Amino acid sequence: MGLKEKLHQFRVKNHDKKWFPVFSGFHTFLFTPNEITKKGTHVKGADDLKRTMNTVVMALIPCLIFGMFNTGYQHYLATGEIEAVANGFFSSGFWTWDNFILGFSKILPLVIVSYVVGLAIEFVFCVIKGHEIEEGYLVTGMLVPLIVPVDLPLWMLTIAIVFGVVIGKEVFGGTGMNILNPALTIRAFLFFAYPTWMSGDKVWVQGAVDGVTKAGSTDAISGETVLGYLAQGNTETLAQKYDLADMFFGFIPGSVGETSTLLILLGGLFLIFSKIASWRIMLSAVIGSLAMGLIFNGVVSAGWIPEYSKFYTLMSFEFWQHLLVGGLAFGIVYMATDPVTGSQTNRGKWIYGFLIGFLSVMIRVFNPGYPEGVFLAILLMNVFAPTIDHYVIRGNVKRRLKRLKNATIYPKTSGEVEALKTETV
Amino acid sequence: MGLLSKKDANLILDPLADNNPITIQVLGICSALAITAELKASVVMSLSVLFVLGVGNMVISLMRNIIPSKIRIIVQLIVVATLVIVVDQVLKAFAYELSKTLAVFVGLIITNCIIMGRFEAFALGNGPWKSFLDGIGNALGYGVILIIVGFFRELLGSGTLFGIPVLGDPIAKTGLYATGYENNGFMIIPPAALIVVGIIIWVQRSRNKALIEEA
């Protein structure tokens, strides 16, 4: 009797035990169960929840690895140990072991804490509820380390994950029932609970906070994000520091995985071609952010806003460059497309996506305190997604009833047709 | 309880747990969200409501047979407004700093749903002694939740209780702060109160399944 067979018998024998969901979860994670359907004909799709989740995680891996290199790169750049790279995406000054090792040692703990804490909660709730383990946390666990600053203390991350998974997901009934995206709930909690660790010019470069707290240290370093520069109106320093290629390739300070628009674009294409994420949401969100950007640019070029206004710099920022900086691209590709919290209907997806892009840029410009408006915009639209769907479905019902009224229906008696025509929504 | 009959005692004890105005009837939420960032404000608010609701319930009950039912809401408002002004003036005279913290929320006791709710639901149909007990009970039930919420929000949000630092000094990094602990800014903003109240409701209903409404 092989191991597989033994495990299967163990499974059958203990199926009513309290801890069974935990065992079952590990079992199906490690082995493909050899149980087959005994009765009737069934059509089974190969793209179950586990595979869907794994595809998204695969799409995130390039961002994660790039984030590791970038963490080291930004740190050594800020301390002055290396020069800025200038030879495109594959420049050898960026892809060095030194950069990678520093980033790896800082980011791996974030990933481990994220998965261990999140899955532990998931297991506890499955045992209490007597459910099968749900794979919902696989993607959240990978997203969370990618959207926080690299120096975030691990205990803060732990508290935020407990909050996000319990209040954001489990109280609504677990995977598939949540209203808000758990990863964004975690980020929002961190943002409001520990703002000094989540914004400002000290958090985006590894080691900058230590540089501040060490009294009398001369190597106090800082790294402002592009949006941070703009919010303060420093366009000159920004232009000296980063050009468009830097922003597109991702050689800029920011949260771990959000800086490289190129890799996010590739991940997004992968998700579209594997039909995991909705291209409607992505496209309409891009259109929405461009539209809002264009409106702001129009206001500036029409001369409606004076140059000393605190919104001037952010408003005059080229509309399409909004997609290159900050978490907008990352949010659109990986967060807005979450099938649970987004709109379900096709027309609803267009509205939902458009408003996400539109609101993100609006929050970005009008509230310099929250340069990263995208997570707030997505959370807000998460709340509105069911309402959008409701009205889309109502509209559809109305349209079809109208069509029915004008149709000639043959086999029915005239009385029945009259009854149909007088029926109202 | 030798002092009270069992029925009378229930008037006070029921609202404390199984018929709590905040967690079961979900009344008086606005003030519970607004002023619970500090424990001191929660306690003073609870005491103010205790006075207004206890006395108000009794006064309305005494007048219940002479109030024409068409204008009863106006009469109730006058009674509660009079009592609230008394509370407000007392606070301004003896605890000026605190009255500035509570600001408009003392005045807003008038619109607290619990008060009008008890006047309508209880005082108009029961005698003064019972109405008084009912008012005290509901105000205590309200106060208990306010104090629980205020305790957690002040402890986690500011690291103090009644304004006294209990976790150490966040600037000099003593006590718990020496280990890298930081105050949770989320607990200070009003949405946190909503979540804390939600957790209390969750705990209460999982301990007593009979309280869960049918879906």
Image (cartoon, coloured by chain):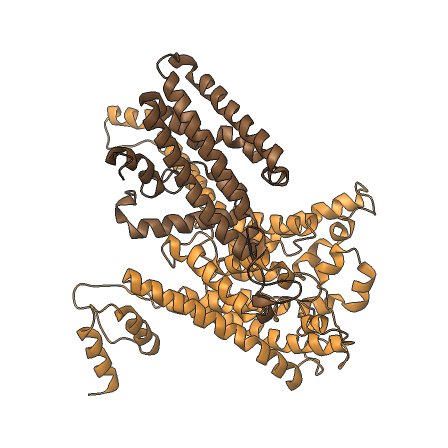
Chain colours: A orange, B brown
Nearer to us in this view, A43 or A231: A231
The x, y position of residue A391, in whole percent, is 45, 39
Q: Nearer the viewer, residue A258 or A162?
A: A162
Query: Is residue A104 positioned above or below A162 on the image?
Result: below
Q: Nearer the viewer, residue B29 or A387?
A: B29
Q: Quadrant of residue B68?
A: top left
**Number of marks present in the image shown:** 0
Residue B126 shows up from this direction: yes
Q: Looking at the image, which residue is at 60% across and 40% down? A: B98
Residue A319 to residue B31: above or below: below
- Give the residue displayed 42% in from the left and 54% down from the top: A178
Q: Position of residue A188 (x, y in %)?
A: 55, 56
Q: Where is the C terminus of chain B found, in terms of image quarters?
A: top left
Residue shown at the point (39%, 57%) measured from the top left: A170
Position in image of residue A133 (x %, y %)? 33, 66
Which image quarter: residue A82?
bottom right
Q: Residue at x 74, y 52 (%)?
A: A314
How far from the left and from the top, in percent, is residue B214? Answer: 28, 42
User: Where, quadrant-wise, is the N terminus of chain B in this rendering?
Assistant: top left
Residue A284 visible in the current orientation: no
Q: Is residue A275 left or right of residue A34?
A: right
The residue closer to the viewer here, A369 or A33, is A369
Q: Quadrant of residue B61?
A: top left
- Check the image and report above or below for A258 versus B213: below
Q: Is residue A126 left or right of residue A10?
A: right
Most extreme residue toward the bottom, as rendered? A1
